[in-house]
Amino acid sequence: MAFIGEDLFHFQASIREEGSTFEDFIRANYVEKWVNENLYHAMRIRTTFVAAIHNYLVNEDLLNLERVEMSPVTDPLAHDVEHVPTIHYKGMPYVATHSMIYSKFLACFNPRLKGIFVDSPNIRLEIESPQRKQRGKYLIDFSQIDIEVRRNRGIGFEDYKSKPDKVKKILRDDFEKAIDFFERMVCAAIGAIIEKNDDDLKALGVALDVPGRPFPRVQHDAAVKKHGKVDIDAKIGEEISSQFFWITGLMRENYDLIYPYILPDGSKVPLAKFTSDMIYNYDICAKSRVRKTGKFTPALEILSGAIREWLYEAIIERLLDNRIISEAPVFEDGLLKNISNLDGYGPFLTAVSMKDGKGMPYFPETFGAGIGVERSLYAMLKGPKIEKIDDITCFGKNPDSFPIFLF
């Protein structure tokens, strides 16, 4: 632990050179926040928000899953992070979970459950803003309510390849079910905040409205064509009066469904040919309304999810295409012959490949999402009292705020 003390020694020295003290820094950046009325009101709203989502999911008959904070494999993410923290235990390296996506899939093997949810701890060592600006959405450790729901459609690989019209209809039906499920969840949470926390909203100078359903939707391809890729959430939000809206069909993670992807002859659709109507994922974006002026703040993505890839063949090809694994698994008599070449993916892909006594895959067809708790609060409460994401957290580690975190 000596290096921690050395880092703090140098940090304190740099503060002193600027004419301040270590105590002044802790008072200004931590203690004054902890005793601040704004954080108190934000924490009250957080409590209602999380409880309302949990109640909604329980009432939908989803089951609570335990947290998985360390695993041999984690979400590879579609964006860069500094590195993945690793801990060695009993001779095995375990990585800190970026999300619980793989654990959610495996938990949904059981055919009796409708779905699962978990308050998922996420550790993502985000790279700080190269422009040294507050981006307002990143914390290196944060809480996400992770949700996964079984679809139970029974579509095998042959139908996937040879009956695209049938498969597309099923996927579109399930896509609408997913949209409906998460819209109702958000409405339940916002309704609870309005009912229980109106005084807190007033104190923070913002207002919330239960959004009308269906939420407005924008396809990602059309939005990029109109606005470009930079700050697309905010630019779309400027054109939409609702506090909540969808962006659909954006190329992202390897487990978000693309269909069609593998063609009847075994070839794959080229990357350049993918369009938003082939990508079955969705984001909910939110913005706050300043109570005094009625004006909205820039929109921010708070929930991301998708119908998931569910067939072994497609899962493997997506992992290869994204260079997450270097080669396909090779199984022989229950052994994974090239297990040493697959890093931590060996156990997961073995489970994905397995079938029951009737020859049916255990791996489930699902849709799901994760809603960031701190990011949602920041998006909804940003205004005259809440300026950056740090303001709604006791211990939030925003990579754009400090060079070192003390708590």
Image (cartoon, rainbow, N blue to C red):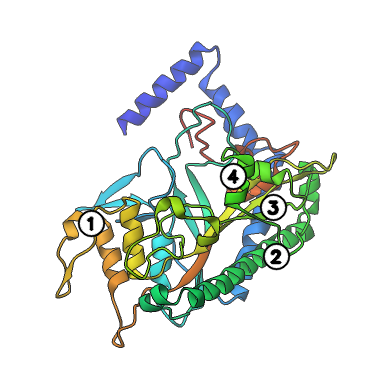
* Amino acid at circle 4: Val
Viewer-nearest of discs 1 and 3: 1
Check if mark 2's residue and mark 1's residue have beta carbons within 8 Å: no
Mark 1 and mark 3 lie on one chain; the one further toward the N terminus is 3
Q: CA distance from mark 2 to mark 1?
A: 45 Å
Q: CA distance from mark 4 to mark 1?
A: 33 Å
Q: CA distance from mark 2 to mark 4?
A: 31 Å
Q: CA distance from mark 4 to mark 3?
A: 34 Å
| Residue denoted by label 4 | 224
* Amino acid at circle 2: Ala
Mark 3 element type: helix
Depth order, front residue of 359/295? 359
Mark 4 and mark 3 lie on one chain; the one further toward the N terminus is 3
Which residue is rendered at x = 22% and y = 63% of the image? 329
In the image, residue 193 above or below residue 228:
below
Mark 3 and mark 2 lie on one chain; the one further toward the N terminus is 3
Viewer-nearest of discs 2 and 1: 1
Check if mark 4's residue and mark 1's residue have beta carbons within 8 Å: no
| Residue denoted by label 1 | 327
Mark 2 and mark 4 lie on one chain; the one further toward the N terminus is 2
